[in-house]
Image (cartoon, rainbow, N blue to C red):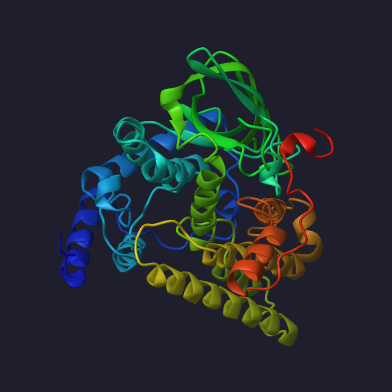
Amino acid sequence: MSQPDPDTWRTEVRQWLTTVLEPARPQRSTGDAAGLAVFHNLLEDEERLLLERCRAYQRARFDAGYQALTLPRDKGGAGLTAAHAAAFAEEESAFDVPPSTELISVTVRLVAMAVSLFGTPEQRQDHARAFLRTDLLACQLFSEPGAGSDLAALRTRARWEGEEWVIDGQKVWTSGAQFAEYGLLLARTDPEVVKQAGITAFLVPMDAPGVEVRPIRQMSGGASFNEVFLSGVRVPDRLRIGQPGQGWEVATATLGFERTASGSGNRRKGGTFADVLALARSLGRTDDPLVRQRLADLYVRTELRAATVDRVARASASGGRPGPEASLTKLMASDLLTRTGQVAAELMGARISADAGEPGTFAWTEHLLGAPGYRLAGGTDQIQRNLIGERVLRLPPEPRVDRMPFSQLPGN
């Protein structure tokens, strides 16, 4: 099937957007703590209302044929090019899109894509479609207390018993688990092979007996992350994603999508250069040559990241699995968030440490306290540098001492 003409298609997108969204509102003030937050810090009822707003837009987008634009048609997507996706994002930026949440992003851009690529036709019809439309919400059950950066060291076990898999273990840093219907989970099904080879992926119903969700209170005050405990959770084989032992391939592809989503900038996270510039003006600091130098550096880094994101998107041929370039955009995104917070803190000095009622100052604590977490989400900065070094620059890989069956590794 031929691709639609980009200019004609862009016009159609713009016309459709006018039917479901209002034009973008003016830039909010720098005193908006919610806008400066890297991670949502909402009460449960507020989070539910935001989720419903997001889901209403995602459903409208799916029904109009604008969801999963680059995913191949035979996998349930629109089968368009990355240029079409970039055009849609550009047109969408002119409208007041409901602010997304981590759970919406994980459902649509991670779990739905993983199930679409690795699932059976029945799983794509029953689950991937519902995830893309957000009729069902899904969290990501990957990280564990002892398996974060080294995800392949996970110890959650799944054993075959009768006609079901029985899962025992613990996951951590799970965004939105308290609202999700399913979780995409990695579990070890064969400890007698090397650690990457013995992992299998499953869709786990979050209301299944034996699943317990416990919120984690963050230093910024919110509780958007959770611990998830699994005790004798029974999962039918029809909810296994991919073949037994294919879980590491599923995880690698999913994390690639996560890094692409984290670095793409499609959802605002924390303060921006425009916010820092407005802050400097409000404090009367823009004539200071050192401040101007810091602002110029931040502006250049902002523009470089935007250009890199655009280049990576346009270089992607279709909706296949993201490559190591996703690590580059993710690393740039976390670095920019950190630097943005640092410049804001330098401008304010002691003002950032207490709420004195001065507009646009103490609210920056939401950014400053949240930015460090973004250096971990989707893979730590160190992991991203390793991936770039080994897979992009072709540098020699780090020495590995774990090329043995998982059961023979120390601690097992």
Q: Nearer the viewer, residue 384 or 105?
A: 384
**Quarter occupied by the N terminus:** bottom left
Q: How far across and how far down the image is residue 233, in percent?
A: 57, 17
Q: How far across and how far down the image is residue 371, in percent?
A: 67, 55
Q: Nearer the viewer, residue 33 or 83?
A: 83
* Up-down relation of residue 278 to residue 122 (above or below): below
- At x 71%, y 65%, the residue is 397
- At x 72%, y 61%, the residue is 382
To which quarter of the image does residue 272 belong?
bottom right
Q: How far across and how far down the image is residue 347, in percent?
A: 73, 70
Q: How far across and how far down the image is residue 166, in percent?
A: 58, 18
* Up-down relation of residue 93 to residue 212 (above or below): below
The answer to whether residue 253 of the structure is visible from this angle is: yes
The answer to whether residue 184 of the structure is visible from this angle is: no
Q: Nearer the viewer, residue 331 or 369?
A: 331
Instruction: Please give left or right for residue 32 compared with residue 71 in the image.
Output: right
Instruction: Please give left or right for residue 354 compared with residue 199 in the image.
Output: right
* Up-down relation of residue 118 to residue 36 (above or below): above
Callout count: 0
- At x 78%, y 51%, the residue is 354
Instruction: Please give left or right for residue 139 compared with residue 62 in the image.
Output: right
**Quarter occupied by the C terminus:** top right
User: Hey, which residue is sitting farthest bottom in the picture?
Assistant: 289
User: Hey, which residue is sitting farthest right in the picture?
Assistant: 410
To which quarter of the image does residue 408 belong?
top right
